[in-house]
Structures are given as structure tokens and as C-alpha cells.
Amino acid sequence: MIGIFREEVYSPNRIGDDAEILRLTAEAIRRQGYAVELRAPEELSPQTQPDMVFAMCEGSACLDILERWEFMGYAVVNNPAAIRNTHRYRMLPLLDCTPVPLPKTMLIRTTESVNGYFDIPKGVWVKRGDVHSTQPEDVQLHFDRAAIDQTLRALHFRWVRQAVLQENIQGDVIKFYGVPGQKWFRHFYHKPGEKAGYPFCPEQIRITAEMAAARLGLEVFGADFVVTEDGHYLIDINSWPSFAPCKEEAAEKIASHLIDRYRRWEPRYTAQWRSA
């Protein structure tokens, strides 16, 4: 098996945590008697023929290689289509036709201006429309139109062509982690010391998170929710987070899932890759 680290550019302030969950997962797999090699994304080669791949990478060059391997019949977790589906410009249309509760959200070009869709004084989040984050400026909360427009212009200047505008909902932020194949889920308050303590049903949040993950094709995922007086809202979902509050337990569950997938994997060698 090959495990692939996340590119540092897609891991702002989380480089150590992201690397650690991959290492812990590899150690748990090795304890079960399987060989695992960990590689940085830049160390990948299309000529490699892995039995199985588990990947945290997000860059297009790495995903293209994963796509090639998957096409050739190798097992890949999370698969490249699922990873790409977490990019906001793809995620929103996929979730729009589901019962998953989302805040008021709009996908726009970074050359556009804000219209009257939002109650701006209550706060609007401006998020880049592709990958989750490469620097703090990729996700910002603003309370006036000028600041929103300025952030959109700054994103456009950095060649980010799409952005997501999302209403700011007052409530408790819940971090949710899941490996549905192992029926394993955990949730934590993002800032326990600042929580209002709104009541919520963990089972309902699990159902929502699992529904969203299944729609995107994720087998290992993390999600952010806001809990309010009247319910909960999904504000983001991503592929293979750092699992920082529960990384040791998560690594064991992820490893079990990967071993189960590996045991079910049947290699095929008939497909021939043809590049576009």
C-alpha cells in the first residue's frame, strides 16, 4: 500500500497534524501485517503500480495520477473524484438537490459584486470556490459590502476565479469526523469555552454528515456544522482531515476500513490508460 501526504500548500497551520494522522494510520496497518510506504505528492510517479492507495493530497497533478491508478483498477481512498467533489464549486451543486441543510449560500465569479441576496450587516463569509484553504485570506467573515468586494478582488488577483458567499449563522460550531465504513463517528465543539450550549441530536448530525459524505463519495471525511436554536446546518465538508482531537482512535478505524477495502479488492489489468 502507498499512503500520500497532503501538499503543504493545502495544509495551512495543519502540516504536522495532517502528517501525523497519515503516519498513525500507516502504523496501524503495519501492525496487521501489511506493508505500507508513505510518500510526498511530488514523489509520485504514474509508472508506479500500487496494490492500494490512501491519499490526503488535493493538488491536480497528484489527483491526475490517482485517477490513472483508479482507472487501471487499483483501489484508491478517498478516490480522486470524491476529493475533487469537496471543492466548493462542485460540492454545492451536488448537495443542493439533497435534504442536507445548508446556510444561504451563493457561488459567484470573483469579478462579480455582491447583490441583495444577503443581509450583509449580519455577516457574510467569503470563501474561495475551489480548494478549502491555502492561507488565512481564503476564508473571511465580513459585515459590509466594500470589504466583501475587496476580498473578491484580492482572490481574483490571485487567479482564484470563483468564490462562495455564505450567510453567517450565529450558533455553536461542531467539528464532526467520520469513517462510515466502520460505523465510526465523533463530534467536538470547535471552541468549547465559547459555546452557547444549544441542544442538538448527535444522531441527526451523523445522518446529515453521512448523507453529504455519500453524495460526494467520501469514505474518510470531516465536516463543520453550526447548531442553532432551530436546528443544525452543514457549513463545510472535506476529505480526510487531521482528526486532531481523536487522531489515535481515528487512525485505528481508518486502518481497519482500508484493510477491509484491500481484502475485497480484485486487481484487473485489462484497462489501458490513454491520456487526453
Image (cartoon, helix red, strand yellow):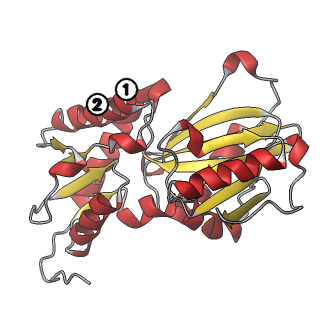
Residue kind at label 1, given as amino acid type: Glu
For marks 1 and 2, the one nearer the N-term is: 2
Front-lying residue, 274 or 120:
120
Residue depicted at x 57% and y 45%: 138
Residue depicted at x 49% and y 25%: 245
- List x then y, in percent, for residue 7: 32, 45
Front-lying residue, 11 or 220:
11
Residue kind at label 2, given as amino acid type: Leu
**Mark 2 residue element:** helix
Dot 1, how many residues are within 10 Å of its Cα: few (below 14), some (14-19), or many (20+)? some
**Mark 1 residue element:** helix
Can you say which quadrant of the picture contains the C terminus?
A: bottom left
Residue assigned mark 2: 24
Relative horizontal placement of residue 106, taking residue 211 as reference (left or right): right
Contact check, label 1 and label 2, Cβ < 8 Å: yes
Residue depicted at x 29% and y 69%: 67
Residue assigned mark 1: 248
- List x then y, in percent, for residue 168: 79, 43
| Above or below, 263 relative to 111 | above
- List x then y, in percent, for residue 158: 51, 54
Front-lying residue, 130 or 115:
115
The number of callouts visible is 2
Q: Is residue 193 visible?
A: yes
Cα gap from disc 1 to disc 2, whole angstroms: 7 Å
| Above or below, 42 relative to 22 | below
Dot 2, how many residues are within 10 Å of its Cα: few (below 14), some (14-19), or many (20+)? some
